[in-house]
Image: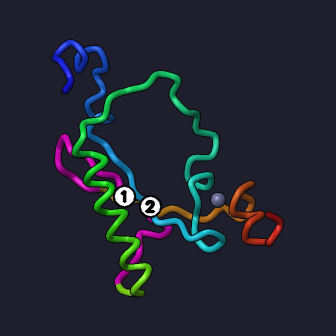
Amino acid sequence: MLTGDELERYDRQIIIFEGRAMTIIPGKTACLMCVYRGATTPEEKFPVIGVTPAVIGCIQATEVIKYIVGLGELLSDRLLIYDGLNLKFTEFRVKKDPNCEHCGQLARGKK
Ligand SMILES: [Zn+2]
């Protein structure tokens, strides 16, 4: 449980309540490197409210079941952003980068 001081310190409610989901099929769809190339990892750790990973975990579990049984439209080449603070879902189309240093090589069988 976060105290008011901790919340004020972080002043990043959108991060605390934000989660992202995307289905990656190696060699076929965009990978995280395609989407976040050049992005850096924050050095500072920040708290995440417990329900955020629960929401994202349910989405991920749903995607696995759909993949296994071959039903529905997977979240591949799409990035879903969950904003728990405003209870909104936003979706972005993402493209596989043919020159991606990770999946580009994987797709060509070099890894
Ligand atoms: Zn990639």
User: Where does ligand 1 appear, by image quarter?
Assistant: bottom right
Q: Residue furthest right?
A: 110
The answer to which of 1 and 86 lies nearer the viewer is 1
Report the residue marked by disc 1.
80
Q: Residues within 10 Å of mark 2 (few under 14, many from 20)?
A: many
The residue segment tinted magenta is: 72-89
**What is the total number of numbered labels drawn onto the structure image?**
2
The reply, left or right, for residue 62 in relation to residue 2 is right
The answer to which of 81 and 6 lies nearer the viewer is 6
Task: State yes or no: Cβ of the residue under disc 1 lies below 8 Å from any atom of ligand 1.
Answer: no
Residue 57: x percent and y percent? 33, 56
Residue 47: x percent and y percent? 32, 29
Q: Quadrant of residue 67?
A: bottom left
Secondary structure at numbered mark 2? loop
Q: Is residue 65 magenta?
A: no
Q: Quadrant of residue 9?
A: top left
In the picture, the quarter occupied by the N terminus is top left
In the picture, the quarter occupied by the C terminus is bottom right
Report the residue marked by disc 2.
22
